[in-house]
């Protein structure tokens, strides 16, 4: 397996990264333009969300052709140039493979609609009464998970949007097609793959109604998932590539299997349990204050569990589907900079491979749109109507979207203080964040040694510099403070301890002389107050401090 323990991945949402041709949409040449910035940041892999042919119903996660580049992003030659120039700078390109479903505009699905039995078997069709779906499962985007096709007198499964038909992985021909797609991109020089909701691809042979939930317990980590992943990785020859699986509603035990090197499935896994601690009654669209006790417990459970089982975590707060973490768990006002740094440090020095989502390294905030007309995300638009139907007022529904919408992470990248933040010279496809501030730009932070950007550069460099971060064990000392998260990394005689104050209030913690004979390696305040060598020490609001006995 590839050694990825000291590497960092940077996620690019090309549509919102940099527009070079003035059409309001980001493009591949825009990524090329910013490669030196990314090299200076210190990242090793650039994960591009889908740039393939797509009707963009779900912003590219509805793929109509896996081997062609959507003209809105550029050409195949542009992508080949990006691969070449990234490699020259010591970075690899990671492509996003959406293999649970295709767009209904894909040739395979169109041929299925035309009556070709071969291609109907590429998807999950079921005969049935037009008034009753095969099961009562619900779509992840709201509404039923099945769609009826009158001309065929059949239903097809679509766990996401109506235009995203689920593939039938039980068909060996489908698995063969997907292997060929991976081989196609390998030949182009791609160095890694991210697999979208990959743990949902193995559906049960017998499908039944779910009277306890929305159906996910029947298809999450399905009956043949490990067998199919092993086959895909082996036959496509990507055992030595960096691979990460997005795991929806998964379990620790399954993620150990997915990512343990001996299993020869994936390099690492994304799980989302820690990003549900502010879901009221487990509902994404139900708002509540974050449960920090639960957050800490989940990190401990997954870090210790994956370590014990030999699995590997993908460490992340943000991505194209999640709100901005500073808006969510940090502070948008007085302690914006401190909380952005603290949240970064909390993730980056743990056991696993860190992922940075574009704009996270400068502390970007949620969109805070005042009107539904500014939203573009299909899930958000669907749920806005659902929330109104549930009896919420327009103001209440907008407040929910302001906290939860995927558009929060998709606002244009803020390069400078210009009208469109240096993203474009024209109106962007998605409005700039209403929380745009001059100090939250690359230009403002580039030469500021105390900036959020500078802090991220230091974190990335530390992982490369100190083997204890990349390879060490992790444990979690008790602090005596509910709002403080602490952990210790050890490798032989080397040791690093991290304290994170998750609150906007000072916190007294049991230091127990933890800093004795150790030096501070990184902190988010200039010259912290007091000593870490005392039995009890005080952490400032959102303070982060890492100290240890490692040498330069």
Image (cartoon, rainbow, N blue to C red):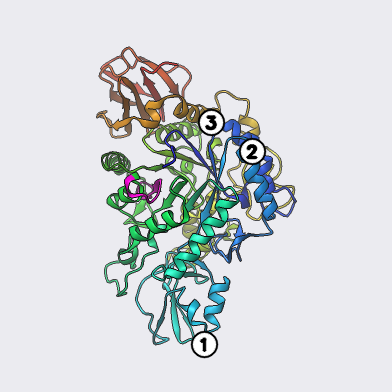
- Whether label 2 touches label 1, CB < 8 Å: no
Q: Residues within 10 Å of mark 1 (few under 14, many from 20)?
A: few
Q: Residues within 10 Å of mark 2 (few under 14, many from 20)?
A: some
Foreground residue among 124 and 163: 124
Residue at horizontal 53%, vertical 56%? 183
Cα distance in 3D space between marks 3 and 2: 19 Å
Cα distance in 3D space between marks 3 and 1: 56 Å
Residue 490 drawn at (x, y percent): 31, 26
Residue 18 seen in the figure: no
Considering only order in the chain, which callout, 1 or 2, is on the residue closer to the N terminus? Answer: 2
Which span is picked out in magenta? 262-277
Q: Report if residue 470 lies within the magenta region.
A: no
* Local SS, label 1: loop
Q: Quadrant of the N terminus?
A: top left
Q: Which residue is mark 3?
A: 452
Cα distance in 3D space between marks 2 and 1: 50 Å
Residue at horizontal 48%, vertical 51%? 194
* Residue 332 position (above or below residue 138): above
Q: Which residue is mark 1?
A: 151
Judge from the rendering whether residue 438 lies leftward or rightward of residue 395; answer left or right.
right
Residue 37 drawn at (x, y percent): 63, 34
Q: Report if residue 270 lies within the magenta region.
A: yes
Foreground residue among 64 and 208: 64
- Whether label 3 touches label 2, CB < 8 Å: no
Residue 5 seen in the figure: yes
- Which callout, 3 or 2, points to the residue nearer the camera? 2
Q: Which residue is mark 2?
A: 35
* Local SS, label 2: helix
How many marks on residues?
3
* Local SS, label 3: helix
């Amino acid at each position: 397996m590839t050694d990825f323990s000291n590497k960092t991945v940077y996620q690019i949402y090309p549509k919102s990264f940099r527009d070079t041709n003035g059409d309001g949409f980001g493009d591949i040449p825009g990524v090329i333009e910013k490669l030196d910035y990314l090299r200076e940041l210190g990242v090793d892999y650039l994960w591009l969300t889908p740039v393939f042919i797509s009707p963009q119903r779900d912003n590219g996660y509805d793929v109509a052709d896996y081997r062609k580049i959507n003209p809105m992003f550029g050409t195949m030659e542009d992508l080949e140039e990006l691969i070449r120039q990234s490699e020259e700078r010591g970075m690899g390109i990671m492509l996003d493979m959406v293999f649970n479903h295709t767009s209904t505009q894909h040739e395979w699905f169109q041929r299925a609609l035309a009556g070709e039995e071969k291609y109907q078997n590429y998807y999950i069709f079921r005969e049935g009464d037009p008034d009753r779906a095969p099961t009562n499962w619900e779509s992840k985007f709201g509404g039923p998970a099945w769609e009826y096709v009158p001309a065929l007198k059949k239903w097809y499964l679509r766990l996401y949007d109506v235009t995203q038909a689920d593939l039938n992985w039980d068909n060996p021909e489908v698995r063969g097609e997907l292997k060929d797609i991976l081989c196609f991109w390998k030949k182009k020089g791609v160095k890694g793959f991210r697999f979208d909701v990959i743990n949902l691809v193995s559906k049960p042979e017998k499908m039944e109604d779910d009277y306890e939930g929305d159906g996910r317990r029947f298809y999450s980590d399905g009956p043949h998932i490990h067998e199919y992943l092993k086959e895909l990785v082996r036959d496509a020859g990507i055992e030595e590539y960096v691979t990460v699986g997005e795991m929806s509603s998964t379990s620790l035990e399954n993620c150990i299997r997915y990512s343990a090197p001996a299993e020869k499935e994936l390099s690492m896994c994304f799980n989302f349990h820690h990003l549900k601690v502010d879901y009221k009654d487990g509902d994404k669209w139900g708002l509540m204050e974050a449960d920090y006790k639960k957050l800490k417990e989940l990190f401990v459970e997954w870090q210790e569990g994956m370590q014990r089982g030999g699995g590997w975590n993908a460490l992340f707060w943000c991505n194209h589907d999640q709100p901005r973490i500073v808006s969510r768990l940090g502070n948008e006002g007085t302690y914006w900079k401190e909380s952005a740094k603290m949240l970064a440090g909390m993730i980056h020095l743990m056991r696993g491979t860190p992922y940075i989502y574009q704009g996270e390294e400068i502390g970007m905030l949620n969109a805070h749109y005042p009107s539904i007309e500014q939203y573009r995300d299909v899930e958000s638009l669907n749920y806005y109507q659902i929330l109104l139907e549930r009896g919420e007022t327009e103001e209440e529904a907008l407040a929910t979207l302001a906290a939860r919408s995927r558009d929060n992470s998709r606002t244009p990248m803020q390069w400078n203080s210009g009208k469109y933040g240096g993203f474009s010279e024209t109106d962007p496809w998605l409005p700039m964040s209403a929380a745009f501030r001059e100090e939250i730009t690359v230009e403002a932070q580039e030469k500021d040694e105390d900036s959020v950007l500078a802090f991220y550069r230091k974190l990335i460099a530390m992982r490369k510099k100190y083997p204890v971060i990349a390879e060490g064990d992790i444990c979690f000392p008790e602090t005596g403070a509910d709002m403080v998260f602490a952990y210790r990394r050890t490798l032989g005689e080397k040791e690093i301890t991290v304290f994170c104050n998750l609150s906007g209030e000072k916190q007294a913690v049991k230091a127990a002389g933890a800093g004795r004979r150790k030096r501070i390696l990184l902190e988010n305040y200039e010259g912290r107050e007091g000593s870490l060598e005392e039995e009890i020490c005080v952490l400032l609001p959102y303070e982060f401090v890492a100290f240890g006995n490692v040498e330069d």
